[in-house]
Image (cartoon, helix red, strand yellow):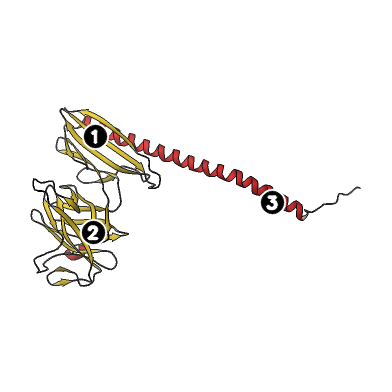
Amino acid sequence: MATRKLKGFTIIEFLLYIGIAGIFIAIILPIITRTIKSVSYYQAKVNVRNEFSKISQKIMQESQNADSLNILPNWGIIFWKGNEYLELRVTKPNLISGTKLTGYAWSYQVGGIALNGTTTEQSPETFQVERTANSGCQITIDTPVESSFLYDGYAWSPNIGWIDFRDMSGQSEYGVCEQPNGDLRGYAWNDVIGWISFNCIDSNVCATANYKVSQSNGRLIGNAYNDVIGWFKFDGDEEKIYLWDGGNEELFTNEFVKVKNLNFENIGKTTRFNLSISNIDETKTFTGTSTLTRFSK
């Protein structure tokens, strides 16, 4: 029986094959990369369009079924039907840049609370909450806590006015401090609603109401509490839409998008809103905008 001898590759053949494979990879790899990017781009665009449609349909459906609407400018809207309501709102980010806080906190009862800016009153005033290094911060006149930073200055709400983060009378009767682990402690003060607590530990209520605000990666995240109006929410870098019916909160938008703008306005007998959303990837953002009209009942 005849036998065949198996020949191995010579060095020249091996190098030749390697060269051909290298040329092939050099040609194919950019095509694969472009295809992956194209698919990602398309998927991001689909996610944005789907969410845009979902949000728009929800607003139109609820507005048509509602007896009346209560607009929260630049934040959201409340749909009233009898004594029941559904609130749709956008969370807005906050940021610690150097010693200054920017952005917003939120309350379901009074709306947005700005951490810096200029008031909209007839005599506008600028305001700023600041965060400065301090190792001996006091949350009351006789309660120092281990701290890395103290907070001072004023936040502003168009509905309840100034929120003072530290007693500036020199008595140190109250204040807000940040501990080395990032948790905030202490109290802010408002002349209309009183004390705002930033950590359940200070009020000794953690067993029944476990809440706190924490600093993480330059953002404030969590809940503060007031006995009169309830929760103040700090949403970090979220830009999402939540639904609230007075007892339950539901995240309405998905993780793939950010809500960049949701603005309502009354024009004559119509209520109009402008909606803009983008995909979550800050390096390649896609935005859809539109204006829809609801004729008031």
Name the amino acid type tagged 3.
Ile
Side of 291 relative to 127 (left or right): right
The x and y percentages for residue 284 are: 40, 44
The secondary structure type at the circle numbered 2 is strand
Along the polypeptide, which appears first: circle 1 or circle 2? Answer: 2
The x and y percentages for residue 161 are: 11, 51
Name the amino acid type tagged 2.
Lys
- Residue located 52% across and 42% down the image: 34
Q: Nearer the viewer, residue 125 or 154?
A: 125
The secondary structure type at the circle numbered 3 is helix
Residue 207 at least partly seen: no
Name the amino acid type tagged 1.
Phe
Q: Nearer the viewer, residue 257 or 116?
A: 116
Residue under label 2, please give it. 100
| Residue 142, disc | none
Determine contact: label 1, label 3, CB under 8 Å.
no
Marks 3 and 2 sit apart, C-alpha to C-alpha, by 58 Å
Marks 1 and 3 sit apart, C-alpha to C-alpha, by 61 Å
- Residue located 23% across and 38% down the image: 263
| Residue 273, disc | 1
Marks 1 and 2 sit apart, C-alpha to C-alpha, by 32 Å
Q: Residue furthest right?
A: 1
Q: Callout 1: 10 Å neighbours few (<14), some, many (20+)?
A: many
The x and y percentages for residue 223 are: 23, 56
Residue under label 3, please give it. 18
Q: Nearer the viewer, residue 191 or 63?
A: 191
